[in-house]
Image: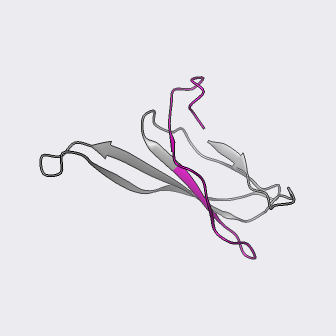
Amino acid sequence: MHGVITDRSGKPVPGAAVSLWWGRNYVSEKTRFSGVGSVLEGYKTDSDGHFASSALWPGDRFKVTVDAEGYGKAESPEITGGAAGSGICP
């Protein structure tokens, strides 16, 4: 996953804290269906607002949160990872 963090006017936001959240569903005898999630990786945007992560797992859930000084916190919608080239991969 990779992206560019910009403000409302389209100006890049350097030094923003970007967190990649991971979630996975599993089956449990007690709850029949449960999930677990946590921060997978954290980044800082470069001078042009870019960030990049390592490979993601197909079928697991991901979202990105961004926090930068002078801006409010932002959160992406949750997505499900897909195989490269499937159109589902972020």
Q: In this view, does 13 lie above or below 25?
A: below
Instruction: Name the residue at 60% across, 27% down.
Output: 87
Q: Is residue 37 left or right of residue 17?
A: left
- x and y percent of residue 53 in the render? 60, 46
**Colouring scheme, one of rainbow, by chain, secondary structure, one colour:** one colour
Front position in the image: 84 or 52 = 84
Check the picture and name the quadrant holding the N terminus. Answer: top right
Provide the major secondary structure of the magenta segment.
loop
Q: Quadrant of residue 24?
A: top left
The question of residue 73 being in magenta is answered with yes
- Taking the view exactly as shown, the residue that stands out farthest to the top is 85
Front position in the image: 80 or 54 = 80
Q: In this view, does 77 lie to the left or right of 71?
A: left
Q: Quadrant of residue 58?
A: top left
Q: In this view, does 53 lie to the left or right of 5?
A: left
Range shown magenta = 63-90
Instruction: Name the residue at 27% across, 43% down.
Output: 26
Q: In this view, does 47 lie above or below 60?
A: below
Instruction: Name the residue at 74% across, 56% down.
Output: 5
Check the picture and name the quadrant holding the C terminus. Answer: top right
Q: Is residue 3 above or below residue 15?
A: above
The question of residue 77 being in magenta is answered with yes
- x and y percent of residue 64 in the render? 58, 54
- Taking the view exactly as shown, the residue that stands out farthest to the left is 29
